[in-house]
Amino acid sequence: MTPTLAVFLFSLATLVLLGAVAVALQALRNERRVRARLEVAERELHAKDAAMEQRSLVHAEELRACADDAALAERAADERVASQVEATRETTRAQISADARAATSNAVRAFGTTVVSLGADVGQVVSNALRENRNDEVYATLTRIDHTVQQMIRQAQAYVIVSGGLPGRRWPQQTIGDVVGGATGRVRDYLRVRTGHCEQVVISRAVEPLVHTVATLLDNALRYSPPSSFVDISYQQGHHGVTVIIDDAGVRMSREQMEEARQVLSGERVVDINALGPSPRVGFPGVAALARRYGFAAYVDGPNIYGGTRAMVFVPAALLVTATEVHQPKHAEVPEKVAPRPVSEIIAPAPQPETVEHDRTSGGLPKRTRRAVATADAPADTGETLARPELAAAWHSGSRHGRAAAARSTKGHDT
């Protein structure tokens, strides 16, 4: 081989080697460039993956929040529906209770009104019989029947009043003394009542409520005091009206009972017939209802000078008439085809109590005890009837003699 060929071949090999080196370098550069692009792509891919994951988390949180909101909305809707159902149920229950209470009050009032009406009819029959048998043997029996009927009417009136009704009787103007006399004739043991006189005149519409009120307080005083004691009625006339004071020597009410009675009588606690239980006491609630309706006031206090209870009825000047306004009509006012009679005529004559002599005391005085005597009361005014002045006069006479006999019967008793 010639040197020239060898140089040529060497040059050619060198060129080929250089070309291979250049190709390798280019391939290396291309590889680096591709790797760089791959790394960039991988980073971008990782970034996109992270962004997608973050977005997925955000969406998941939003979905959870939406789910929570939906659950809260559903719970709120359920609570609203439940509250509406409960409110509807309570309203229905309250309406049913109110209807039941109203039905009970109406039933009691209707029953009491029926009893008052029937008692008035019986009283009218007895009243006529009393006029026809003034001197007969049946007179005492008739007076006892009449008095029992009047007590029955008073009890029925109390239920009517507590149930929202009216007393049902109307009288012309009467003095407070006649009002107290009428009330005395409606209690069981009237001989134990000692009263004075008061010439103040009560307006017509307030007579029957005051008679019922005083009779209720008298009955309470007589019922809870010893049978040998008396109940005294006095009057205090003032600038604003007249106060009827009832003092007994009986059992005092406890502090709790006194406070309860004060709340009921003052109207702080209104009691209806549905709240009185199976054994209703309608006395004080009835008095409070009448006081609210007609404008007078009733109180209880104690102890009094006898160690018992004092009851007071304040009759304001608005329920009284002056001397120039006093008039006594020949016939009573007729509100609705009802011809009332003066209150003093509701008291029927009372027989004198019988006395029985027993052993003597250490001082030699005889001991006398009196038997219980039922007295008569007049019938309710439910129809046009004649007045009973002769019966009122007989009652006053019998009452005076009866009190004298009762006073004599207490002499010689051991205290």
Image (spheres, rainbow, N blue to C red):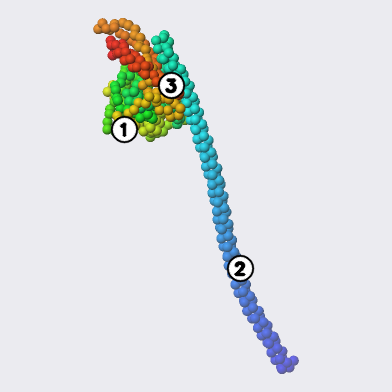
- Of badges 2 and 3, nearer the viewer stands 3
Type of amino acid under label 2: Leu
The structure residue drawn at horizontal position 34% and vertical position 17%, both measured from the top left corner, is 393
Q: Element at badge 3?
A: loop
Would you say the residues marked 2 and 1 are in contact, meaning their CB atoms lie under 8 Å apart? no
State which tag comes first along the sequence, 3 or 1: 1
Type of amino acid under label 1: Ala
Question: Is the residue 361 above or below the residue 33 in the image?
Answer: above
**Does residue 404 appear in the picture of this structure?**
yes
The structure residue drawn at horizontal position 38% and vertical position 24%, both measured from the top left corner, is 330
Occupied quadrant, residue 332: top left
Tell me where residue 92 appears, x and y as whole percent: 53, 38
Q: CA distance from mark 3 to mark 1?
A: 31 Å
Going by the image, does 30 lie left or right of 182? Answer: right
Q: Element at badge 2?
A: helix
Q: Element at badge 1?
A: helix
Residue at image mark 2 = 45
- Of badges 2 and 1, nearer the viewer stands 1
Tell me where residue 388 appears, x and y as whole percent: 39, 19
Tell me where residue 179 appears, x and y as whole percent: 35, 24
Occupied quadrant, residue 246: top left
Type of amino acid under label 3: Thr
Residue at image mark 3 = 385
Going by the image, does 316 lie left or right of 147? Answer: left
Question: Which numbered disc covers residue 317?
Answer: 1
- Of badges 3 and 1, nearer the viewer stands 3
The quadrant of the rendering that contains the C terminus is top left
The structure residue drawn at horizontal position 44% and vertical position 14%, both measured from the top left corner, is 129
State which tag comes first along the sequence, 2 or 1: 2
The structure residue drawn at horizontal position 52% and vertical position 42%, both measured from the top left corner, is 87
Tell me where residue 187 appears, x and y as whole percent: 38, 20
